[in-house]
Structure formats: C-alpha cells, structure tokens
Image (spheres, grey):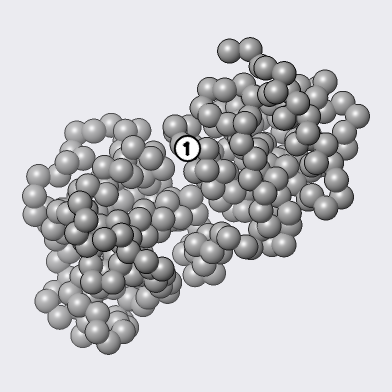
Amino acid sequence: MADTKLDKEFLKTILSLAARAEVDHLLLVSDTPLSPEMLRGRPLKKKLVYAVSEEQLAAALRRQGYTCVTVPPYDYSRVEKVKVALVAAMTANVLADGENVLCLTGRSGARTPDTLIRLQIGRGFEEKGAIDTIGLGAEFSSQVVEAMVSLAMAIGHEGFEGHPIGTIFVLGDSTAVMEQSKQLTINPFQGMSEADRNVLDPTIREALKNFAVLDGAFVIREDGVVLAAGRYLQVGGHAADRAGVDLPLGLGARHAAAAAITVETRAIAVSVSQSSGTVRVFKEGKAVLELQQVARRS
C-alpha cells in the first residue's frame, strides 16, 4: 500500500520533534530505513538508532555511519517491538540512563511507521533495569532473560483459565540440567525445529503459558531454545537444606528445587509462586531478583 499524505506528515512531524535539543535519540524499529530525502536538512544522524531484523541491512547501515542494533525476526506487536529494541540498544550501551528517547515503529511489513512512544531510559522499564543489576554473566542473553521474566510475570498475573498456577523456567547449562532431571510427561517440544521453539517468538511464549499447567519445569538453552517441558528436577526432597541454598522462610518445594538446581549447575531459574504470583530469579542457590504482582487477574 502506498504511503498516504497523513503517513508522510506524521513522519515529518516526528523527525522535526526528534531534532529538538531535548531529545537524545530516535529509535526506529523497522526494516525500512528512512530515505535520504526525509533526513535532508535535519541533524539526526548522530541521534538516529536503527533496530532491524536483517543482519545484512544492519551491516549496510553501519557502513553508512548509522548506529544499528539487531532484533529477532518475529511477528511482535508494536509495543513489544519497542521493548525488544530497547533491550537490544541498552545491552549494546547505545542508550544511557536518563536519556529521552522517541521510539518509532509500525505494523510488520509496513513501509511507514505509525506508532510513537516517548520515554526516559531508567523510568518505566524496571524489569530490564533489575535484570541488569544481578550480574548473570556473558553466556546469558539479556533479551532471553527479559523475555522469560516478562513471561513469568504474565503467568503469575493471569494464571490459567482463571486459576493461579506456579512453574519453573531453568535457563542455561542445559546439558547438566537435563542430566539432573527426568521427564514427567510427554515433552510437547520434542521433534520441533529450533527456530520454531525459541522464547523470543511471541507464539512460543503463548504456548509456554498453556504448558505451564504441566507438572515439572521448563528447560531452556541460553539462546532461548526450549528443550523440554514437564521435567522433574532431581535435586533431592530437602533442597532447602542443601549446602549453598539460601531460601527465604515460607517458600515451598517449587522454590527449593529452583534454588537447588542453580547450585548443582551453572543455570539460573525463574520461579512463579502459585499462591502469590511472585516471580523470583535464582542464581547460585540464592534469590537475586524478586518481583511482586501489583494485582492478579481473578
């Protein structure tokens, strides 16, 4: 579909706004770069940050002197596109705390963006900021961890068909985790291609919400590929008493197993409490992040 007059006026207005001194960056989440005509006469090259899904396009933009980050090529909603791009840009140290950013995106496949989000880095992005402070290590992808924490928060809030549920996601050191666990049910991800079972894909995250009703834990590789659901973590019946496990009082067997597997392996574990919906991230036997639900869907 050809760009309408309104599309062009909208983009011109945003580019004029982005040129103002109060704006530090314009984050454009699109695989369609701005035309030279649109940028002519506007001092935007240093402010402009592209977030694209094609590596060749990213390389070409960098050769032209633009700042560019890559994002997974999945069919995200507009808001999720912005969130994923922000994670990528912050991980690459392109954006800094306190900076004012205009985020511009549109529907998948559209040539012209139609959605603008204005934000200040460090405000309204608490999950990513919290994840950055817990020192997970270079082997973990910030995008994958942020996606898992967001998914866990959604499960804690929504439950399943109106009923609260709890679950565990074990991320990283997957060979060791698989060796220290056993299958409780048929693995719904068995036989699927790796490209079709990555947690960065919104479709897979929706599937994980449904499979969270299964007993056992999910095992996920560092790059986000889901290896199994319904795994029983064989870390002993008294995991809270194991050396290296530091579990707050009042937490039950699910949290004890989540903590213990991070002692026995180099994985991290994300647990969802069935009773409260609280999400905890465990590393080396300790809860290094705790996110409470503001409210739960009933």
Residue 184 horizontal side relative to residue 212, left or right: left
In the image as oriented, which residue stretches furthest toward the left?
A: 185
Residue located 26% across and 42% down the image: 207
Residue 175 x, y percent position in the rendering: 26, 53
Q: For the residue marked with disc 1, what is the amino acid? A: Ser
Residue 105 located left or right of residue 25:
left
**Residue found 36% across the figure and 77% down from its top:** 286
Residue name at image x 75 percent, y 26 percent:
9
Q: Measured along the vertical axis of the image, is residue 76 above or below residue 223? A: above
Rendered image quadrant of residue 154? bottom left
Q: Position of residue 162 (x, y in %)?
A: 21, 56
Nearer to the camera, 262 or 87: 87
In the image, residue 226 lies at what x, y percent? 29, 45
Q: What residue is pinned by disc 1?
A: 77
Q: Quadrant of the C terminus?
A: bottom left
Is 207 placed above or below 148 here?
above
Residue occupying the point 20% across, 48% down: 211
Task: Identify the element where label 1 is drawn.
Answer: loop
Residue 294 falls in image quadrant: bottom left
